[in-house]
Image (spheres, rainbow, N blue to C red):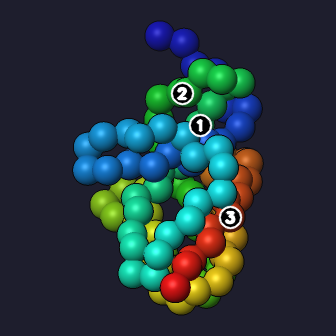
Amino acid sequence: MSVVAAKRLGLHRRDGGLDLGELVDDVELITGDEMLVEVEPYLNSQRLLGHGASEWTADPAITLLRDGSLARRRVVARTPGQATLTVKAFGFEKTLTIRVLP
């Protein structure tokens, strides 16, 4: 086993136990929609194992709910508009733009 430091963060969409892949583009949700998002450490293009403490913030158009893991949140679209989701972990910051449609 080897230990390497992360070089970037990735945000992954999850559905139950399935990883639907890294979110690389903006996301559109309809008011009332939900999605699970998990932060993952990367070394360039290689996803690394492990999770640590993370800090999540978002604009008012969406609500963030804890979902059983330090690295995962349930994102709920509350009101139409654009929101920026920001996650800080492993000394890095990652943002995702989420547009909530009526």
| Residue 53 place in picture, x, y as percent | 53, 55
Q: Amino acid at mark 1?
A: Pro
Say which label, 3 or 1, has the lower sequence index: 1
* Left-right relation of 63 to 82: left
Q: Residue 101 appears in which quarter of the rendering? A: bottom right
Residue at label 1?
41
| Residue 80 place in picture, x, y as percent | 58, 86
- The residue positioned 65% from the left and 44% from the top of the image is 24
In the rendered image, the vertical position of residue 93 relative to residue 4, given as above or below: below
Report if residue 38 is visible in the image: yes
Contact between marks 3 and 2 (CB within 8 A): the answer is no
Residue at label 2?
48
Counting other residues with Cα less than 10 Å from the Cα at mark 1, is it few (<14), some (14-19), or many (20 or more)? many
**Front residue of 97 and 91:** 97
Counting other residues with Cα less than 10 Å from the Cα at mark 2, is it few (<14), some (14-19), or many (20 or more)? some
Residue at the front extreme? 102
**Front residue of 102 and 3:** 102
**Which of labels 3 and 2 is toward the front?**
3
Dot 2 lies on which element?
A: loop
In the rendered image, the vertical position of residue 90 relative to residue 76, given as above or below: above
Q: Amino acid at mark 3?
A: Thr
**Front residue of 53 and 64:** 64
Q: Residue 40 appears in which quarter of the rendering? A: top right
**Which of labels 3 and 1 is toward the front?**
3
Residue at label 3?
97
